[in-house]
Amino acid sequence: MNASSLSLQNGLEDILGDLRYARRKNDLGRLALLAYCEVRRWARQAEAQELARHSSALVNNFPHASRDDFLAAVDALIAELEQARCSAGSAPNDSFSDEIH
């Protein structure tokens, strides 16, 4: 694993930790901020364009019908990030951006 891949993986771990904490606290504002700013920035760096679009759409595309609807969308985003993390750990010799596609 090269330094860039390690940096991306560490960044992903940090974001997941922040998201999980905000989710446990039901902090909608923090969840929206993390999804739009941090997840989108990380996804672009990792060249995960679909994940970047999903994180942006979570905040921008439509108002959610309810608090529970928004939290379900956040849960789906967290699941996507966890899948990206698992993919990154399964092939240590490849570049990180190749692993998450």
Image (cartoon, rainbow, N blue to C red):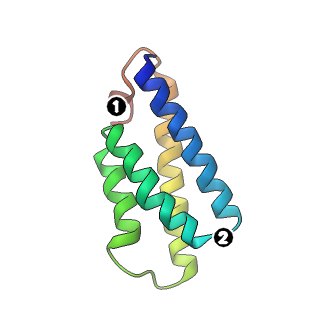
- Disc 2 crowd rating (10 Å Cα; few below 14, some 14-19, many 20+) is few
* Disc 2 to disc 1, C-alpha distance: 31 Å
- The x, y position of residue 16, in whole percent, is 58, 47
- Disc 1 crowd rating (10 Å Cα; few below 14, some 14-19, many 20+) is some
* Residue kind at label 1, given as amino acid type: Ser
Tag 2, which secondary structure? loop
- The x, y position of residue 5, in whole percent, is 43, 25
- The x, y position of residue 15, in whole percent, is 55, 47
Say which quarter of the image contains residue 93: top left
In the rendered image, the quadrant that contains the C terminus is top left
Residue 26 marker: 2
- Nearest to the observer: residue 25 or residue 90: 25
- Name the residue located 29 percent from the left edge and 47 percent from the top edge: 49
Q: Which residue is mark 1?
A: 97
* Residue kind at label 2, given as amino acid type: Asn
- Name the residue located 51 percent from the left edge and 40 percent from the top edge: 12
